[in-house]
Amino acid sequence: MTIELIGITATQETSNAPSEHNRVDGISAQTEAGVPVGPTVNPEYAARLARAHEDAGFDRVLIAHSSATPDGFLVASHVLQSTERLGVLLAHRPGFLAPTLAARAYATLDAFHPGRVAMHVITGGDDVDQARDGDFSDKTTRYRRTDDFLTVLRREWESSEPFDHDGEFYRVRGAWSAVRPTPGGIPIYFGGASEDAIRVGGKHADAYAFWGEPLDGIRERIEQVRAAAAPYGRDPRFSVSLRPIVADTEEAAWARAEAILDATRERWGTTRRTFGLDGSNAVGSQRLLEAADKGDVHDKRLWTALAKVTGATGNSTALVGTHEQVADALLDYVALGVTTLLIRGFDPLADATSYAPVIELVRRGAEQRLALATA
């Protein structure tokens, strides 16, 4: 069983300095418990963080997207040039770049770094963030647009002859690209929890991504996506995103979790007001909040307290424990059919390094389970 581990990159350092020294002068997409410091784009730090992920055994790093973050294609190029084998999962929000242009941009990046590029399609659950880039369409419209976008994008990647397309949002005549993905292709990851998301993702996704819900919720969602994909002859892989908080002892891990929660409470309100962050109209956020309302801890060690504080704006549930305990909890998701684990912490550089034992334990555990299943 091949398990894929994905981390997250950043171009700006963060600090956990006391609040009197904190300043909110940029969005830190990587951690809620610290504040961004230094330039928004720090090439040396970005390269060091990427290499830390590569050394720890990660397969890829996510390059996240918002209306305020640096250009993802340029960040991806820097990460790929700074490492030897690490791949990128480059987030893309359809609607702002023509699908033919996006297809060629991804294919060009893949041509320079064969087999190391993947696309993460995020249709956008936050109306406020969409509006910052001039998009005022509602979510239903955005998902229809994403469907049309991905139809054209795949044809641009796969067509050896010029093609026409007449869709609801995109019309092209004689479209054709001289650059196409290298053998193996560029996998499309897809995120979203609404009925529209499942319908569109089932049609197009190679890997469908979920936030870290309790196990029963993930089991339910896997069934939903498989049912949506079946009419198209698709059998997507599945990804779960979690925020492990690890330490040498369980007691120390929970103490660290409480410190992270306190720091998040201290600064999140200011960040949220300043940048209008709000995940309340995203179904994925609603699902995390519903779980949080039922209790702070689910299954063995899924901790949802941070989701309450942040309004579940993004990936905000954690696994708390020792390296062995967290690896065991991750393997419970693998047992449901999850083959991609996106894990990121609250101190990006230190956590990326500290996850190395977890990654080794997860890979070993997955192999052992496969061996038992085929014995």
Image: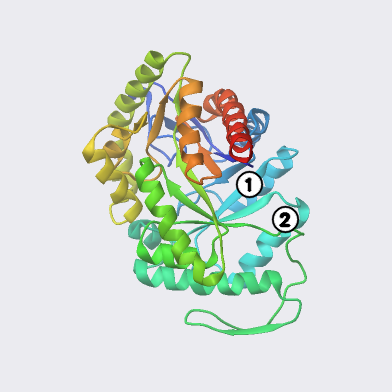
Spatial CA distance of label 2 from label 1 is 10 Å
Residue 247: mark = none
Q: Pick whichever, 193 or 134, lies toward us.
A: 193
Residue 88: mark = 1
Q: How many marks?
A: 2
Disc 2 target residue: 110
Give the left or right position of residue 113, taking residue 366 as reference. right
Can residue 29 be seen here? The reply is no
Q: Position of residue 73 (x, y in %)?
A: 62, 53
Can residue 303 be seen here? The reply is yes
At label 1, the amino acid type is Val
Q: Position of residue 167 (x, y in %)?
A: 51, 82
Q: Quadrant of the C terminus?
A: top right
- Examine the image and state in which quarter residue 130 appears: bottom left
At label 2, the amino acid type is Asp
Task: Identify the residue at image location x=70%, y=44%.
Answer: 80
Q: Position of residue 94 (x, y in %)?
A: 50, 65
355 is higher (above) or lower (below) than 140: above
Give the left or right position of residue 161, taking residue 152 as reference. right
Q: Pick whichever, 126 or 227, lies toward us.
A: 227
Q: Residue furthest front?
A: 375
Q: Pick whichever, 313 or 359, lies toward us.
A: 359
Closer to the chain start, of discs 2 and 1, is 1
Q: Position of residue 6 (x, y in %)?
A: 57, 40
Give the left or right position of residue 103, taking residue 321 as reference. right
Task: Identify the residue at image location x=70%, y=49%.
Answer: 116
Mark 2, Cα crowd under 10 Å, few <14 / some 14-19 / many 20+, is many
Mark 1, Cα crowd under 10 Å, few <14 / some 14-19 / many 20+, is many
- Looking at the rendered structure, the secondary structure element under dot 1 is strand
- Looking at the rendered structure, the secondary structure element under dot 2 is helix
Task: Identify the residue at image location x=28%, y=52%.
Answer: 280
